[in-house]
Image (cartoon, rainbow, N blue to C red):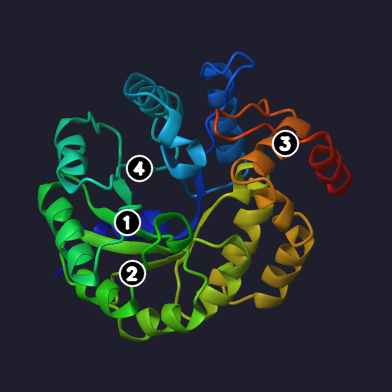
């Protein structure tokens, strides 16, 4: 029996891969961070993900990561669960982070596959197994081949799903056949979470439990409603919610993530649009198209 199984319902529904708000001088905007946390919680999301790639984790410092997490734990104050992103293309470095980071107030770890190294499937199994053995918290795998240049196959995911400290996967491969293969054979208490906003109802229909979303930063209420409708079997309502967001979705990624969703958040008055190099703030044309759709 999976030792962390009682935690699994915490991660049904809509999680938000939070952006990190920056001031115009590119320091972390902690007032904007608190406002974003409240905006998402008030919108009805189910849990929050701190320090994912949408949060520009490659360009936030160690001290900033600590303060973002500390502030989130303090400000959220148990209103929703928190997931924290820890990963590296150096397995030993990721293990060290798991062992040395203060994870008080965190419910689970989201860990993306190593990028750039392009490990074999056996290497991915060894990497995640070592992290799962070291981690004081349950781990959610994150398969995002578009960023990591490696794909966790269905067979590899199902093998890792047998580990008692690996409780689920954020699947962002976009390969529905692969997702179906996981859904068909996964342990009952293993979470299959969409990593692609537009595939959320489809994945839930096939046995998924929810989404870790980018768009939910700016549209938490809409995304929470459509996800919960799908989980309740009301796919007509879920489709309508999704169709409402469909024209906006490509604009979120046109100039890379999180450039588009930060432009949407600026238009909504939640936080500023600034991103750190090598990303650039959304162009005027993109901002205007987003504003018109909003």
Say which quarter of the image contains residue 34. Answer: top right
Q: CA distance from mark 1 to mark 3?
A: 28 Å
Say which quarter of the image contains residue 99. Answer: top left
User: Which label belongs to residue 85?
Assistant: 4
User: What crowding class fits label 4: few (fewer than 14 Cα within 10 Å), some (14-19), or many (20 or more)?
Assistant: many
Residue 2 placement (x, y as % from top left): 17, 66
Q: CA distance from mark 4 to mark 1?
A: 11 Å
Q: Where does the N terminus fall, quadrant-wise? A: bottom left
Lower position in the chain sequence, tag 2 or tag 3: 2
Residue 68 placement (x, y as % from top left): 41, 25
Q: Where does the C terminus fall, quadrant-wise? A: top right
Q: Secondary structure at mark 2?
A: loop
Closest to the observer, 99 or 113: 113
Lower position in the chain sequence, tag 1 or tag 3: 1
The answer to whether residue 292 is above or below residue 198 is: above
Q: Which residue is mark 3?
A: 282
Q: Which residue is mark 1?
A: 113
User: What crowding class fits label 2: few (fewer than 14 Cα within 10 Å), some (14-19), or many (20 or more)?
Assistant: many
Say which quarter of the image contains residue 74. Answer: top left
Q: Which residue is mark 2?
A: 152
Q: Nearer the viewer, mark 4 or mark 3?
A: 3
């Amino acid at each position: 029996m999976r030792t962390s199984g009682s935690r699994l319902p915490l991660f049904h529904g809509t999680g938000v891969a939070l952006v990190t708000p920056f001031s115009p001088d590119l320091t972390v905007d902690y007032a904007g961070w608190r406002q974003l946390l409240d905006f998402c919680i008030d919108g009805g999301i189910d849990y929050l993900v701190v320090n994912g790639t949408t949060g520009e984790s490659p360009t936030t410092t160690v001290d900033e990561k600590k303060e973002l997490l500390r502030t989130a734990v303090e400000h959220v104050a148990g209103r929703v669960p928190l997931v924290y992103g820890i990963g590296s293309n150096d397995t030993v470095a990721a293990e060290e982070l798991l062992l040395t980071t203060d994870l008080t107030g965190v419910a689970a770890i989201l860990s993306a596959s190593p990028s750039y190294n392009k490990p074999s499937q056996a290497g991915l199994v060894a990497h995640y197994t070592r992290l799962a053995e070291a981690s004081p918290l349950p781990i959610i795998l994150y398969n995002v081949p578009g960023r990591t240049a490696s794909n966790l196959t269905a067979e590899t995911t199902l093998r890792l799903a047998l580990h008692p400290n690996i409780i689920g996967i954020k699947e962002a491969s976009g390969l529905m056949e692969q997702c179906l293969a996981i859904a068909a054979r996964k342990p009952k208490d293993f979470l299959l979470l969409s990593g692609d906003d537009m595939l959320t109802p489809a994945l839930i229909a096939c046995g998924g439990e929810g989404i870790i979303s980018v768009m939910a930063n700016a549209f938490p209420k809409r995304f929470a409603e459509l996800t919960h409708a799908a989980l309740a079997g009301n796919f007509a309502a879920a489709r309508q919610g999704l169709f409402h967001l469909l024209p906006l979705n490509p604009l979120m990624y046109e100039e890379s993530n999180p450039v588009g969703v930060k432009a949407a958040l600026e238009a909504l008055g939640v936080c500023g649009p600034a991103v750190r190099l090598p990303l650039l703030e959304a162009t005027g044309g993109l901002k205007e198209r987003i504003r018109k759709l909003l």
